[in-house]
Image: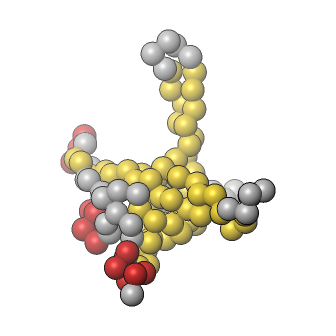
Amino acid sequence: MLNQVVLVGRLTDDLQVTTVENGKKVTSLILAVQRTFKNSDGIYETDFIRCTLWNAVASNASEYCKKGDVVGIKGRLQVNTYEDKDGNKKTSTEVIAEKVTFLSNKKDDEK
């Protein structure tokens, strides 16, 4: 069995690392990933994908990556199940990043 995801997109915001139980560091980001095909109006749509980064991956990404940068993320999909405030069962899907590769920043793209 294999659960592997590779994404390339732009960061929609700067990263903020927080420390949680047992001193683990975590940050989450939204990666804007443009689709490879045009819709019926001739426009490339964009998917906004939530990714979670832990420990050294979180620290390094927050130090070197900023809003607008293009990054590559390699990781795995994780599906979480929870109950909302009304007791309804819900699921959410996120990418747990195992590696983040800095590809370019906004200033490089504007040259």
Residue 92 image-quadrant placement: top right
Estimate the x, y position of residue 29 in percent, counting from the top left. 40, 53
What is the image's colouring? Answer: secondary structure
Quarter of the image where one finds residue 99: bottom left
Q: Is residue 79 left or right of residue 69?
A: right
**Quarter of the image containing the C terminus?**
bottom left
At a point 52% along the width and 47% down the height, the residue shown is 94
* Percent of width and height locating residue 98: 45, 63
User: At 68% across and 62% down in the image, what residue appears?
Assistant: 43
Q: In the figure, is residue 106 to the left or right of 96?
A: left
In the image shown, does 96 or 16 lie closer to the viewer?
16
Q: Is residue 83 left or right of residue 108?
A: right
In this view, 57 is above or below 30:
below
Residue 106 point in image, percent of width and height? 37, 75
The one of 64 and 18 positioned closer to us in this rendering: 64
Position above or below: 59 against 93: below
